[in-house]
Image: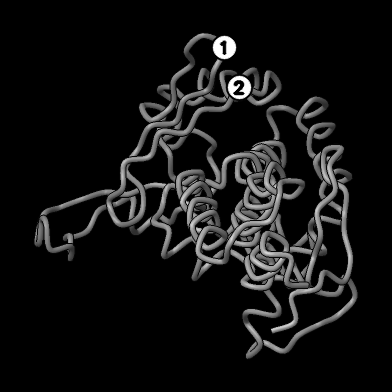
Amino acid sequence: MDSTPIGEFKYQGKTYPVWSSFEAHYKPGDSELGKFNRYAKLGLNADKVIAKFKDLIQKQPLSKEAHLAYACLLMLQSGIRVGNEDSAAGYESQLSGNPGEFVQTYGVTTLKPEHVEIHDNTLVLHFLGKKQVEQNIKIEDPFMVSFGEDYLDAAVGTQETWLGVDLGDLTRFIKLNFGEQFVPKDLRTFKANVTAFDLMRPYLDEAPVEKKDAKEETKMLVAGVAEALGNTPAVAKGAYLDARMLEWFLNVRTKHL
């Protein structure tokens, strides 16, 4: 595996390396390469799109497009899953701990007003997520807190969900604003990989270590990403993180470049 970065993008004032071309296009069968190609493209345009979304929300806060833009910003900031109507309606658990139990799980498009609170200038989202994992997301960005509270006030007693959008709406909005090849999960993948590299930064200027110690550091990084996403380290590593970035980190920490 070639772990040498081939480019970089700037996001919120920081630089992030990438291992996929900004220009390449991949066939549907190349799911891994395509996913990280979209990550690179998203990073190249993220600041511009975020500014566009914030402008839309400020100018047309009650429009459906503003609610969709807000949902995208929330996914980029927190990595929250998109959610779907069937899971929110409820199903019988298949997990060994509670087989047959009726459960309802949620994501950004299906959160209800009771899942949303404002405490000490912080937006708090508390809900049961995929695999019945308790999620407790805290957002301190004043812009997100302010409009999140406005949407909460508007939703109470008038609609079933907090943001009043569904999976189909959000998927179409993402394709329109990011590119036809993009899907909602790409925003979660973006959050995972920028989080991973931010967690790597403190190590990059430190003295090299033995490979076993570098592997332990990598394990801790993956655990940090899993915590940010609200899933397990195995899922974070297998479904979201670019393996080339993790290999590069190992090489840097052991100076085997």
**Number of residues whose C-alpha sits closer than 10 Å to that of mark 2, classed few (under 14), some (14–19) or many (20 or more):** some
User: Residue, x 45% and y 53% (percent of image)?
Assistant: 83
Q: Amino acid at mark 2?
A: Glu
User: Residue, x 21% and y 50% (percent of image)?
Assistant: 103
- Residue topped by disc 2: 140
User: Residue, x 38% and y 39% (percent of image)?
Assistant: 135
Judged from the image, the secondary structure of the residue bearing numbered disc 2 is loop
Q: x, y (%) of residue 204?
A: 74, 50
Q: x, y (%) of residue 99?
A: 10, 61
Quarter of the image holding residue 233? bottom left
Q: Amino acid at mark 1?
A: Asn
Judged from the image, the secondary structure of the residue bearing numbered disc 1 is loop
Q: Quadrant of the C terminus?
A: bottom right
| Towards the viewer: 202 or 141 | 202
- Residue topped by disc 1: 121
Side of 148 relative to 13 (left or right): left
How far is mark 2 from mark 1, CA to CA?
7 Å
Side of 177 relative to 243 (left or right): right
| Towards the viewer: 143 or 158 | 143
